[in-house]
Amino acid sequence: MNLTGKVAIVTGASSGIGAALAKCLGASGAAVAVNYASDHEVAEHTAAEITRKGGRAVAIYADVSIAADVERLFHETNKVFGPPSVLVNNAGRYDFGPIDVVTEEAFHREFNLNVLAPILTVQEALKYFPETGGSIININSITSENPVYNSALYSASEGALDNLTAALAKELGPRRIRVYAVAPGSTVTKRARRIGLAGRELQKTTAAATPPVGLGQPQDIAALVAFLASDESAWMTGQRTTASRGSR
């Protein structure tokens, strides 16, 4: 996709799926703000890799569940590259466990990042997006429609994000802003490996259920997001696209 001239903000972009999205957007011509909340060194490495390959990128710290941080993220992006017209809400968390151990703190932690943060970033994006419009892409999960075991809290937050996407597409359409949700299936990332969602046994099970492809890689999601960020997707809005290699 040709994204030359566009400025994109990718939240949670230091590693994993977010880093793959930022790199793909940068390779397609967009100037990219690589947002991070916890790993400065990895985020700088992601931005440097985009730059080394001829793109433009900058790493910017912000906890996107905090309004003041979101304001600063957009302000700094605009100062470096100009106003953004692409927002990718990739930052999120997935905590699994039985319903009887869910606490108020856990609820707010999950929903603050998975639901409140996209609301805050969209609010701020409306102050910067040009009159010609832009695109907002919310990265959620196949669990929003097909929850897995011990995922009540996470799946509830992702279901909320699905409905937020659909509502925003209708509300922001008159402003020429397109809104999408992309729902990856089981994808191999460091965090997924760390909490046991991407190990050898899971890979075998997924491969058996979805021959011949198996688990996805972060870069498998990136081309779809680049398409939705481009003018080629101008006739689409409000869609939730499952990127799962056939798994549900």
Image (spheres, helix red, strand yellow):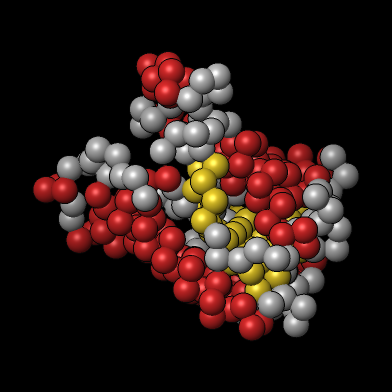
Location of residue 142 with respect to 6 vertically, above or below = above
Location of residue 82 with respect to 44 vertically, above or below = below
Q: Residue at x 48, y 68 (%)?
A: 166
**Could you say where residue 6 lies in the image, as x and y percent from the top left?**
80, 63
Q: Residue at x 65, y 50 (%)?
A: 225
Q: Is residue 212 visible?
A: yes
* 72 to the left or right of 215: right
Q: Residue at x 44, y 68 (%)?
A: 164
**Could you say where residue 232 lies in the image, as x and y percent from the top left?**
77, 58
**Could you say where residue 230 lies in the image, as x and y percent from the top left?**
76, 58
* 39 to the left or right of 114: right
The C terminus is located in which quarter?
A: top left
Location of residue 80 with respect to 148 vertically, above or below = below
Location of residue 222 with respect to 216 vertically, above or below = below
Q: How many marks?
A: 0
* 95 to the left or right of 100: right
Nearest the eye: 138 or 14? 138
Q: Residue at x 25, y 38 (%)?
A: 149
Q: Is residue 120 visible?
A: no
| Picture quadrant of residue 17 | top right
**Could you say where residue 3 lies in the image, as x and y percent from the top left?**
81, 56
| Picture quadrant of residue 31 | bottom right
